[in-house]
Image (cartoon, grey):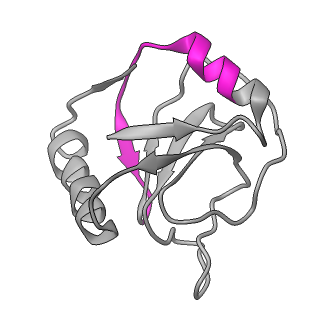
């Protein structure tokens, strides 16, 4: 899976994450959001957003975690994906497959990495 970085909203966040790579992390989930354990990058709120879109990738300043949104979170409302709390947007998943297949892929990450506690490397 690849993420297209976009530093237009959160340039300090993107720079801090790039400077931290590579990172070995564990993945967790919350609703249809995958989030990665705390990473070395430390950035405060930077144009933090309270509503995100499917396949957005963001940084949660309070926990220094990367979040991948592929559907609603437990606090989402009808038609909106809501992170808790607001997050710094820094990219989107790039894919050439239909969204439904991408969702199946991300759900398979839950089964293969989260349930078995297998770390991944971000690079």
Count of marks, rendered view: 0
Q: Quadrant of residue 120?
A: top left
Q: Which residues are magenta?
A: 14-31
Q: Is 93 situated left or right of 47 in this image?
A: left
Q: Residue furthest front?
A: 96
- Where 77 sits versus 24, above or below? below
Residue 30 image point, x, y percent: 44, 58
Q: Quadrant of the N terminus?
A: top left
Q: Is 97 situated left or right of 36 in this image?
A: left
Residue 7 image point, x, y percent: 71, 34
- Where 84 sits versus 72, above or below? above
Residue at x 46% of width, y 39% of height? 3
Residue at x 26% of width, y 27% of height? 119
Q: Is 100 situated left or right of 18 in this image?
A: left
- Where 5 sits versus 15, above or below? below
Residue 90 image point, x, y percent: 64, 40
Q: Quadrant of the C terminus?
A: top left
Residue 84 image point, x, y percent: 65, 58
> Any magenta on residue 42?
no
Q: Residue furthest bottom?
A: 78
Residue at x 71% of width, y 36% of height? 61
- Where 59 sits versus 18, above or below? below
Residue at x 29% of width, y 67% of height? 98
């Amino acid at each position: 899976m690849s993420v297209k970085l976009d530093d237009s909203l959160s340039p300090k966040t993107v720079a801090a994450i790039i400077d931290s790579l590579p990172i070995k992390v564990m993945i967790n989930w919350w609703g249809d959001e995958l989030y990665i354990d705390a990473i070395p990058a430390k950035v405060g709120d930077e144009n933090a957003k309270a509503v995100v879109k499917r396949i957005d990738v963001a940084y949660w300043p309070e926990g220094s975690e990367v979040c991948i949104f592929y559907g609603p979170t437990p606090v989402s409302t009808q038609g909106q994906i809501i992170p808790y709390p607001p997050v710094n947007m820094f990219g989107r998943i790039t894919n050439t497959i239909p969204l439904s297949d991408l969702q199946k892929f991300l759900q398979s990450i839950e089964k293969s990495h989260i349930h078995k506690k297998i770390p991944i490397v971000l690079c």
